[in-house]
């Protein structure tokens, strides 16, 4: 069954337990004892998806020693790519203890940052639990369509559900950010939950909640760049690009000159994108005869999955991709850091709006068309 509902606020919740430990003088030290673990373990930067170090496991024990320039999200993976624990790593001593067959009970030693990160996790877990019954009910309703396109009424229900959970998460996380405005975890939270896809005014107001110290962290600086990217192209000419369609024929954005065109960045593996697709289809069907078109730009890497998703979601407009994933030339040109992401370009080739989803897309198209 295709799962069109995605609580994209969920963090990797592994190793949430806590116990105290003494900090070393410089750098970090991670001592791990995981019963039943063997082979190698990898310390991976969660944001860059890059391995920082590898350690050999002996009798369930392993050790990582190093230094980070500033606190950052890291995960420990086994040689089978199984996540063992996540942590917000800073230059301190940490212990990781538990059993390989019970990862939910893994204990990671505490620090102030660890405790703050745990607060964010607890907020998300509580909200997910609150909305879970509604999600399950919607999943059951969706299954009744038996592979057919959902009705507009059902799509509206899904849209309302997503708006409700988004509003709840953002309200609760705003409280956390205000209370911990000097913490790098506040900057991480702002970057992860209030990024691309939000109204520019909301982004600027949220960034202003952070202290100067938090704004200067890696995540704070990344968020500042996101804000500048949001400002960058509005009311400016849309930069042209060319990629191949599913039949390997090149299509350029400039070929849509003279039409209103929604440039829709998505991917087959992106659950929020797939959940949004019915809204985009409805908009296309309503306005396709009013000088409006859509150009789908995929951040896929596997052509088969991309083509299959187009057919499964009944997306009748043209689709292009260079099959480079996040390294997509078009995605990099427009500073795409999360999807779904779209821009609305007028017949003169000028970007007039961004990140139009659900009712917002319908409202904007009704306004301009």
Image (cartoon, rainbow, N blue to C red):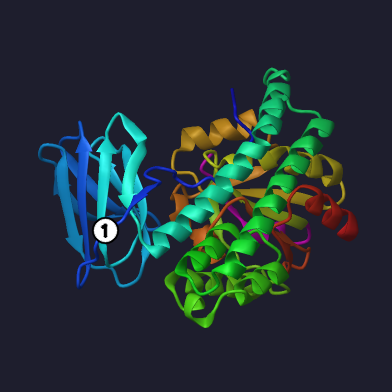
**Height in image: 93 above or below 102?**
below
The reply to whether the magenta stretch includes residue 247 is yes
Q: Is residue 362 above or below residue 354?
A: above
Residue visible at 18% across and 55% down in the picture: 64
- On the rendered structure, is 318 left or right of 122? right
What residue is drawn where x is 68% and y is 30%? 133
Q: Position of residue 77 (x, y in %)?
A: 28, 43
Residue nearest the viewer, comparing 48 with 350:
48
Task: Residue 148: say if magenta.
Answer: no
Front-most of residues 108 and 75: 108
Residue at the limit of the structure toward the left, as seen here: 58
Q: Where the C terminus falls, by quadrant?
A: bottom right
Residue lying at the far front in this picture: please name it: 20
Neighbourhood count class around disc 1 (C-alpha, 10 Å): few under 14, some 14–19, many 20 upward: some
Q: Quadrant of residue 114?
A: bottom left
Looking at the image, residue 3 sits to the left or right of residue 97; the answer is right
- Image coordinates of residue 329 in percent, x first then y, are 48, 59
- Identify which residue is drawn at 80% across, 39% down: 282
Q: Secondary structure at mark 1?
A: loop
Going 64% across and 70% down the picture, which residue do you hit?
Answer: 206
Q: Is residue 274 left or right of residue 257?
A: left
Q: Nearer the viewer, residue 132 or 97?
A: 97
Percent of width and height locating residue 297: 58, 50
Where's residue 98, x and y in %?
27, 38
Could one spot residue 8 in this view of the protein? no
Q: Nearer the viewer, residue 37 or 334?
A: 37
The quarter of the displayed image where residue 352 is located: bottom right
Residue range (magenta): 246-259
Which residue in the protein does label 1 denote?
A: 21
Q: Is residue 52 visible?
A: yes
């Amino acid at each position: 069954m295709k799962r069109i509902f995605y609580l994209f606020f969920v963090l990797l919740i592994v190793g949430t337990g806590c116990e105290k430990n003494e900090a070393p003088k410089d750098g970090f030290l991670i001592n791990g004892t995981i019963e039943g673990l063997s082979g190698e373990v990898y310390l991976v930067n969660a944001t860059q998806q890059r391995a920082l170090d590898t350690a050999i496991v002996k009798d369930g024990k392993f050790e990582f020693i190093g230094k980070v320039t500033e606190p950052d999200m890291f995960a420990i993976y086994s040689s089978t790519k199984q996540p063992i624990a996540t942590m917000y790593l800073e230059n301190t001593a940490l212990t990781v203890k538990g059993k390989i067959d019970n990862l939910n009970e893994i204990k990671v030693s505490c620090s102030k940052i660890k405790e703050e990160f745990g607060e964010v996790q607890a907020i998300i877990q509580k909200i997910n639990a609150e909305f879970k019954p509604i999600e399950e009910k919607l999943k059951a309703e969706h299954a009744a369509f038996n592979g057919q396109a959902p009705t507009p009424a059902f799509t509206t229900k899904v849209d309302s559900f997503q708006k409700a959970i988004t509003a709840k998460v953002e309200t609760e996380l705003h409280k956390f950010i205000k209370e911990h405005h000097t913490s790098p975890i506040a900057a991480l939270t702002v970057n992860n939950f209030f990024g691309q896809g939000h109204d520019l005014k909301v982004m600027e107001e949220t960034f202003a909640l952070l202290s100067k110290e938090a704004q200067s962290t890696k995540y704070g600086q990344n968020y500042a760049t996101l804000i500048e990217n949001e400002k960058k192209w509005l009311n400016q000419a849309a930069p042209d690009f060319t990629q191949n369609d599913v039949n390997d024929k090149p299509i350029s954005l400039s070929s849509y000159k003279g039409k209103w065109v929604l440039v829709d960045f998505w991917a087959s593996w992106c659950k929020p994108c797939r959940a949004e697709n019915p809204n985009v289809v409805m908009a296309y069907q309503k306005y396709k005869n009013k000088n409006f078109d859509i150009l789908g730009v995929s951040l896929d890497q596997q052509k088969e999955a991309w083509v299959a998703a187009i057919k499964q979601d009944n997306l009748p407009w043209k689709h292009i991709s260079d099959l480079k994933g996040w390294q997509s030339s078009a995605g990099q040109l427009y500073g795409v850091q999360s999807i779904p992401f779209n821009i609305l370009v007028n017949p003169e080739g000028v970007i007039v709006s961004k990140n139009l989803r659900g009712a917002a897309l319908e409202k904007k198209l009704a306004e301009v068309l």
